[in-house]
Image (spheres, rainbow, N blue to C red):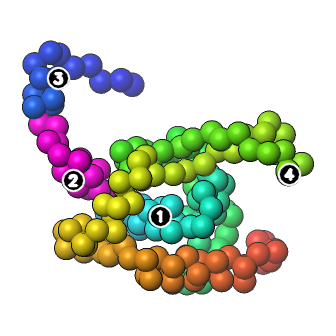
Amino acid sequence: MKESFDKKEIRAALKNLPKTLEETYEHALRISKKSKDKAQCILEWVAFSFEPLTIQQVVDTLAIDVGDQHFSKNDGIRDLENQLGKIISSTLVIITHVEVNARFSWMDDGYETRLQFAHPSVKEYIISLKLQSKLHSVISNRLAHEFIAQSCITYLLHCGKDEGK
């Protein structure tokens, strides 16, 4: 259901828009406690992965529990494309449909759905020292790579295991 606004409400909302790019990102990073871990996971993977992430890869990364060293496809978010806005702002990350070489037979349509930063300045901002002092969590190159490595190890340890056991 769409909300309707009168002109007075629209003018008030426009007056309260962030004035700078930094304020815009600060506003976008006001993430609910419920979604904070998922949002941080997405930011770290998008910022420090060596290749662009497909939506399915993001679903899989969100299903990994590094602390419990557990992975189950059943723990993944169904329909992430429609659920993403509930986790993280589209000011920070966007979904793109990219044409790819038909190098894989399972890619019938020749397109991949990927998740990427909305703009290169997003990565610069989230790893900046200014942000680290404002947030209680730190996104750093070393810590993100450590988290990604732990996630990969957890995934590989569970890859191929029968989920019913």
On screen, residue 155 versus residue 102, left or right, reads: left
Q: Which residue lies at the image location 12% right of the left edge and 23% below the top edge?
A: 11
Q: CA distance from mark 3 to mark 2?
A: 23 Å
Q: Earlier in the sequence, mark 1 or mark 2?
A: 2
On screen, residue 52 versus residue 107, left or right, reads: left
Q: CA distance from mark 1 to mark 2?
A: 18 Å
Q: Which residue lies at the image location 31% right of the left edge and 60% below the top edge?
A: 125
Q: Earlier in the sequence, mark 3 or mark 1?
A: 3
Q: Which residue is mark 4?
A: 104
Q: Which residue is mark 2?
A: 22
- Mark 1, Cα crowd under 10 Å, few <14 / some 14-19 / many 20+, is many
Quadrant of residue 149 within the rendered picture: bottom right
**Is there a contact, CB below 8 Å, between mark 3 and mark 1?**
no
Q: CA distance from mark 3 to mark 1?
A: 34 Å
Q: CA distance from mark 3 to mark 4?
A: 48 Å
Q: CA distance from mark 2 to mark 4?
A: 40 Å
Q: Amino acid at mark 1?
A: Ala
SS for callout 2: helix
- Mark 4, Cα crowd under 10 Å, few <14 / some 14-19 / many 20+, is few
Q: Which residue is mark 3?
A: 10
* Residue 14 % position (x, y): 15, 29
Q: Which residue is mark 1?
A: 47
Q: Amino acid at mark 3?
A: Ile
Q: Amino acid at mark 2?
A: Glu
Residue 88 at least partly seen = no
* Residue 118 % position (x, y): 43, 46
Q: Earlier in the sequence, mark 2 or mark 4?
A: 2
